Amino acid sequence: MRKLSILVGLALIASTLSLHSQDNVEAPNYELIRSQITDSTSPNYYPRLMERFMQCDTTLELENYRALYYGFPLREDFIPYQEESAALLNIRRRVLQANCPPDSCAEIIEVAKKALANNPFDLTALTIIPLCYEIMADDEHFRQWDIKRQGIIDAIFSSGDGESPETAYHVINVEHEYELLNSRHLELSQVKVENMQTDFMQVRENADSIAGIYFNFSACSQIYKEKYK
């Protein structure tokens, strides 16, 4: 029987994290991404790309993940500032903050997958699923879902360095800011709104002496203005 504490679980999920190894750090160019995801001849044509993502295609590359993640708010059905469900957050606490028995994991995975049906880039759900597969000792599915989640994380971390408003990490949902702090084992102290599109997530004292991380949520704010003007 395998049981994971919060620190062990997060370490497993972060095992492939490559925060500072991105060769091409660049903010998303939404016009370029729009042209790629709507071109049926493009390798980043969104319907095909999303199908590969949903099928846990492990051959997807960083460019594909960037098109997936930053192309999502360009869809007509995108909901800006979508909140995560309380049920999902409660499940996350069960998995990460307590010893979770393997016989409860199948049910937890189903709840997380239902959340992904409405929001395929729900980082809380994408964190829960590989952890549960690890607890169940299902190495094949753990690897598939760990790669899937890591691809989205890497896409976000390829959009900047988080050290200033100008080089902030770009997110399509402000809820992702909290999960990204978790992925770096940073504890939130307070949120400071720098401007209409940037948050500064100030963190508590840590081994890396990081004061905080800047996040740009312009995709949310722009879509909100367009939909609700």
Image: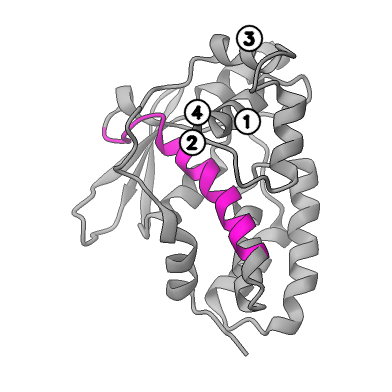
Q: Are marks 4 and 1 in contact (CB under 8 Å)?
A: no
Q: Residues within 10 Å of mark 3 (few under 14, many from 20)?
A: some
Q: Is mark 3 on a helix, strand or loop?
A: helix
Q: Do the residues labelled 1 and 3 touch (CB within 8 Å)?
A: no
Q: Are marks 1 and 2 in contact (CB under 8 Å)?
A: yes
Question: Which residue was labeled with disc 4?
Answer: 217
Lower position in the chain sequence, tag 1 or tag 3? 3
Lower position in the chain sequence, tag 3 or tag 2? 3
Residue at 27%, 30% (x, y): give it.
164
Between marks 4 and 3 in the image, the one whose residue lies nearer the viewer = 3
Task: Look at the image and tell me in which quarter the N terminus lies.
Answer: bottom right
Question: Which residue was labeled with disc 2?
Answer: 155
Question: Which residue was labeled with disc 3?
Answer: 35
Magenta extent: 141-163
Of 33 and 163, which appears nearest the observer?
33
Name the chief secondary structure element in magenta.
helix
